Amino acid sequence: MSFIVAIDGPSGTGKGTITELIAKKFNFQYLDTGATYRCVTLKMIKENIKMDETEKIKEMLKNIKIEFDGEKVFLDGEDVSKKIREADVTSMVSQVSHLQEVRTAMVELQRRMSEGKEVILDGRDIGTNVFPNAEVKIYLDASSEERAKRRFKQNKEKGIDIPFEEVKKNIEFRDENDKNAKIGPLKQAEDAIYIDTTNLSIKQVEAKVTKIIKKKKKLVEKIEKAYVMTKETKWKIFRRKFTKGFLGLLYKIVYRPKMNGLENLPKDEGYIICANHMNYLDAAGLILCNKFPIRFIAKADLYRFGILSYLGHLFNIIPVKRDTGDINSVKLCLKALKNKEVLGIFPEGTRKGLEKNAKVKNGAVFLAEKAKVKIIPVGIHGTFKPFTKVTFNYGKPVDVSEFKKEGSDWLDKASTKVMNDIVMLTKKED
Ligand code: DC
């Protein structure tokens, strides 16, 4: 299972120490991304490459070999764990880390090293750039005075002798450089949890981070379970029938739904229903007020919440993690379509309604083509104010394979056609 913990923040906030402790505790692989930039810097010093020698830097990056073994760091096979912490590297690394070529190569290396694993990475841009979808993002901070004290002590323990004032100046200089860098600046990700460690002991920070990770792990495990469909036992079928009957009756009383164009639905084959999306009640209407079962695709986060998670399992709703190319979700969808089941997708993605210029997602067309099934556009007309009528207009099937001859952007063209049909169908009132 992949589980990424991103620890960002300036130097001397205890990132390294905390990351190491957490890695051991949870048995995560530890990736010190700062060390990768330090290795590049050391190699530039060794090979006497200057900052502006872009071609030489590119060439050097092609052959560089950086490896980790526990706390040890290897550069081209040599143990450089100590060398990369020395003053010559430390004073140059910030500038080197902001060279475009270096950044691109290291970000790629960090992603490759972490792929599909449970990894904790510490750095500057992990949550914002390397892994913007990391499961946990933490931003550690502390005053520069406190950070200098810590780094000075740490250096002493490692046998590195740099005067305190120099350590402090170096930290402040690097702060400026890291925060104002045009490429890969140090910045807190919007969804990162901020921890000020100035007055906290390592133990206290560790406890805070542990709590955050444990909570997220539990949640991720819960969401992962959503990808394993619960068995279709008699009891589950009974509960579904009962829930559908009961909630369906309530729905019919409150919204007086009307279904038009049901004769357009293919028989004895799988297909995808694509509708406009105003609020959760439109999906509920399609699920509860049709005789045939529809399996909706919904964002995996739905499975975080008690009652929604229960209903998700009961109606076999397929989870999808947005913007991550969710292979497991695609597999479930294709399997269902092969099984001649009916899928429900909202091509607008979120509940935007028919907002002008809303970008239509290609997912439905992609699945329809892969599974060789048709798409049924559905226009939903109504305000969802209680005791008003809601009309569901089913349109003619769209065969997306006909768009394949339209060139490389055929997916977009077919998606637009589906969306245009939906828009037309929303205009029919009864
Ligand atoms: O954490 P550290 O002091 O070992 O990092 C060394 C330098 O590398 C530091 O100046 C910032 C830079 N760095 C970066 O730009 N991006 C990262 N992800 C990690 C470190």
Image: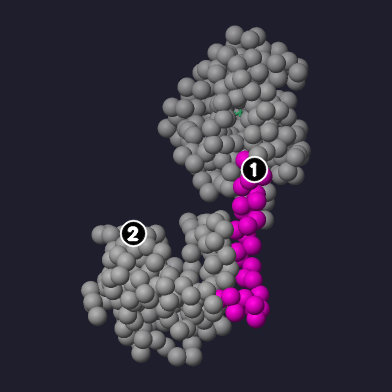
Q: Amino acid at mark 1?
A: Ile
> Are discs 2 and 1 less than 8 Å apart at CB?
no
The residue at which mark 1 appears reads as: 213
Q: Please name the residue that numbered disc 2 is placed on.
A: 352
Q: Which residues are magenta?
A: 212-240
On whether residue 225 falls in the magenta region, the answer is yes
Placement of 18 over or under 274, stated as above or below: above
Q: Is residue 321 left or right of residue 40?
A: left
Against 157, residue 291 (above or below) is below
- Residue 100 image point, x, y percent: 48, 37
Residue 416 x, y percent position in the rendering: 31, 70
The percent coordinates of residue 346 (x first, y second) are 40, 67
Q: Nearer the viewer, residue 19 or 53?
A: 19
Q: Is residue 389 visible?
A: yes
Residue 43: percent from left, percent from top: 63, 31
- Residue shown at 70% from the left, 19% from the top: 154
Residue 407 magenta-highlighted: no
The reply to whether residue 359 is in sight is no
Q: Earlier in the sequence, mark 2 or mark 1?
A: 1
Q: Main secondary structure of the magenta part?
A: helix
